Amino acid sequence: MTPDQMKQVVRIESITIPMPGEFFAAINKQGRPNWKQLVRTGTPEATASRSQIALILGTLVADGYIAVEAQDSQGVKNIGKEIINLAKKLNVSQSVLGRGNSINDFADNNDWNALREELEATQNEVKLDMFEQKDSNLVTLVTLGAWMRGTEIASGLIERSYTPESARLLRQPAIIEYLLEQIGTLPQGMQEDPLISKLRVALEKSRDFVKAETPSTENVKDLHETMSSIVTAIATGA
Amino acid sequence: MKPTYAKLLPIGIMTRLLQVLAAAVLLPAAFAQENPTPPPPTVESDVSARSKALELAGAFSNDGYKIRDGYWPGEIEPNRAQFLEVNLFAGNEYWFSAAVTAPGRKIAVSVFNENGNPVDYQTYEDGQAAAAGLVAEVSGRYFVKMSLLEGDKSQFCLLYSYK
């Protein structure tokens, strides 16, 4: 590619940023983890902050993929219900709410491939609704939440049984750059939200941990700590 | 590997196709982040290109590939390739499937690493539809190139699947 062509490259969030399912597919090739142990239970804490709701919704999408990997049909249904509950709080349309029924149907039939597709379709439909309701700033936050929860899980698994091959899966500096750029486009007021500030700091720290072709054991440990801490902050708002 | 056209599209893919028609134009426009942003295509041509790309990707899904919900629609003209950034995971297998509508007649898809150098990939070309398949050797950024080899300016759609 010529330098001019490199400048013409297009980025489209719904393709350029991978879904947690892709990350987990790569991890499964290194040795299938015990996904059942990783399924998160419980209801997210109530909050009135739309930013926090969007972030939590993103983390739940990643949780949905974990439940799919664990082949936990009740877990997927519970997470689907939570996603729809949060989407309602953001005033999404009726069509998104119908996704909840599809998730339940696919879960009842143990149709795991369809569930992977349905989770992404649900996320994209929520984002489309946000965009149509002039809430496009929240779109970035859903993406951020999903990526951070996915990375928390992936880095935790790799930390537990480190191999250079598995650590190489974490090399994603371009995604972090993209997410930081997106945070930079949020309205000033939103950027000054303490939770969003924490997110930015966490991403800036994490950028150094995933730069090397093979992140070290220390890099992986630091990345996992950083992601765990920020996912907890998203859940609690603290 | 070549896709098998004798097989029917999986029901899930057909259902998904119907579900996305209404959002065919709005969603990608909402998430397009960088230049060049082509003028919005007509709904008919966009949906037609997407249908063709989905049909091709559907054939790969018979081999266990999962299709991403997101896609890239736009306009392409001869001698002016389009490039898309994607982020892939080492060890995963990918197929990037694309299609154009008339007056486009023949397209090609190719893949480059983060330095802009070509990587090893398989190709499938069938006139208005084409695909490039690879196993990502390293995790990180890649670029997908779409070229219109024959025909005039037309609408395209690109999507990808993985396993």
Image (cartoon, coloured by chain):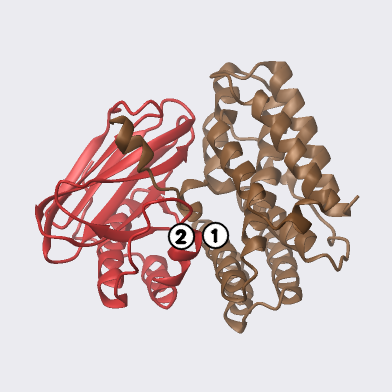
Q: Amino acid at mark 1?
A: Glu
Give residue B163's position: percent from left, percent from top. 43, 43
Quarter the N terminus of chain A occupies: top left
Q: Is residue A167 shown above or below A64?
A: above
**Contact (CB < 8 A) between labels 1 and 2?**
yes
Circle number at residue B69: 2
Residue at x 45%, y 48% (from the top left corner): A11
Q: As rendered, which of A222 and B5 lies closer to the eye?
A: A222
Rendering quarter of residue B152: bottom left
Circle number at residue A120: 1
Colour that chain A carries in the picture:
brown
Residue at x 85%, y 49% (from the top left corner): A194
Residue at x 65%, y 47% (from the top left corner): A184
Left or right, B48 with reference to A64: left
Give residue A53's position: percent from left, percent from top. 77, 63
Q: Secondary structure at mark 1?
A: helix
| Residue A70 in view of the camera | no
| Residue A190 in view of the camera | yes
Label 2 crowd bin: few (<14), some (14–19), many (20+), radius 10 Å: many
Q: Which residue is outermost to the front?
A: A188
Left or right, B123 with reference to A62: left
Subunit of label 2: B
Q: Is residue B26 shown above or below A177?
A: below
Give residue B103's position: percent from left, percent from top. 11, 65
Rendering quarter of residue A219: top right
User: How many discs appear?
Assistant: 2
Chain (red)? B
Q: As rendered, which of A39 and B116 lies closer to the eye?
A: B116
Subunit of label 1: A
Q: As rendered, which of B61 and A124 lies closer to the eye?
A: A124
Label 1 crowd bin: few (<14), some (14–19), many (20+), radius 10 Å: many
Q: CA distance from mark 1 to mark 2?
A: 6 Å
